[in-house]
Image (tube, helix red, strand yellow):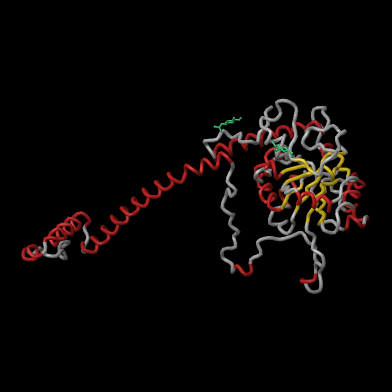
Amino acid sequence: MMFKSVPRFQFTQFLLDPSQFSLWLFDSVLAMLLCVRKPSEMRRLVLTGVLGVMLGILIGITSTKYEFVARVPLIQVATNAPPQVRHEAYHTGAELLPPGIVVPTTDLFTRRLWGNPADDIPYQPKYLVTFTVGFEQREIIKAAVSKFSKDWTIVFFHYDGRVNEWDQYDWAQRAIHISARKQTKWWFANRFLHPDVVAPFEYIFIWDEDLGVEHFDGEEYIRLVKKHGLEISQPGLEPNRGLTWQMTKRLGNSEVHKNTTEKPGWCHDPYSPPCAGFVEIMAPVFSKSAWRCAWNLIQNDLVHGWGLDFALGRCVQPAHEKIGVVDSQYIIHQTVPSLGNQGESQNGRAPWEGVRQRCNYEWQLFRERLRKADQEWQPTGNGTRNHEVKS
Ligand SMILES: *[C@@H]1O[C@H](CO)[C@@H](O)[C@H](O)[C@H]1NC(C)=O
Ligand SMILES: *[C@@H]1O[C@H](CO)[C@@H](O)[C@H](O)[C@H]1NC(C)=O
């Protein structure tokens, strides 16, 4: 029977030790309720369980309290300036491997097929420049490439499929060629310039193909960017060329500038884009760490990158000091219609019209995503935190 192993109650024992009585009672009740043969073991289990739950509740209460206390200053920090580290480092997937063999980053240096790998790269470039190119713009590209010394690794992103035709030029053989028809600079950058792929480079230039570089020199540019602590920058733009923004217009008498005044109503705050903390997406230059952040802002489906320029300030703090325009090394935007013409004409409209419309739509989508992300991330803020233009 089930009661067999229940210790018999002994009155003498009870007299000697009253606690024995309560134990006996407990075991008997357990045995009846749970139909177990060894209630004393069960007792241990149940008691352990109860203790565990109590401990859990205790820990829960304490940590909730702690969190409550800790949260107050966190919110204050967050609304004044976003915290520097936002997310846990992503997992590499290499957890099962011995760390000594794991190579988490790579580079874009070309190697030989023979000899000692250690001697493959006699000179290691420090910077990277990419151009998104069509063959038609080869003369402009040739001039641009000449302004970047052997300190730069050069990558061409081809959007017109005419890769082989560049082979005839010695200077083009210096470059790494990546080809995908009718894709944009940001599509390429998102897919081929992952921060772990361009890890060795101190600065990364992500440039359009229609930039005149007569008044530009790469080495001098780097010197100024370092001198003025610019994490994200661009060369000034020659003014007489239908400019959109005051900020990126080159000033005649300075090395760099980090702010400007716009038309009335364009900047709700002198420390925010497009009056400060702002460069355009046509010829940006990123420090390694700024790019590590900025790459994450690129949306897979928003290929034109419109609106990115207004968000880049989130990647460096304070943005109005670390983003700027280099005036004394400036470029001329040639405004060559290129990728725009690779669109399709629809309903009797020119190809570029459809592309332009898509650009604007992407900008709208990007703004909306960012606003939503801000709200989800910091429900107390109103999502406009120093990054939006009034329009
Ligand atoms: C704008 O730049 C000037 C000169 O560099 C500086 O004195 C001023 O504080 C800057 N203003 C803002 C809003 O960053
Ligand atoms: C919301 O944004 C506006 C600027 O558009 C700012 O003046 C205001 O202080 C912000 N409110 C909060 C609660 O952050």
User: Foreground: 59 or 376?
Assistant: 59
Question: Is the residue 193 above or below the residue 272 in the image?
Answer: below
Splitting the image into 4 quarters, where does residue 341 fall? top right
**How far across and how far down the image is residue 359, in percent?**
74, 35
Quarter holding ligand 2 = top right
Name the residue at 67% across, 28% down: 390
**Quarter of the figure with the N terminus:** bottom left
**How far across and how far down the image is residue 179, in percent?**
80, 51
Name the residue at 52% across, 35% down: 380
**How far across and how far down the image is residue 109, in percent?**
78, 61
Extreme residue toward the bottom, this view: 115
User: Foreground: 275 or 172?
Assistant: 275
Question: Is the residue 316 above or below the residue 47 in the image?
Answer: above
**How far across and how far down the image is residue 165, in percent?**
91, 52
- Give left or right: position of 158 versus 142: left
Splitting the image into 4 quarters, where does residue 264 fall? top right
For the image, the number of numbered tags is: 0
- Give left or right: position of 214 versus 262: right
Name the residue at 26% across, 57% down: 46
**Quarter of the figure with the C terminus:** top right
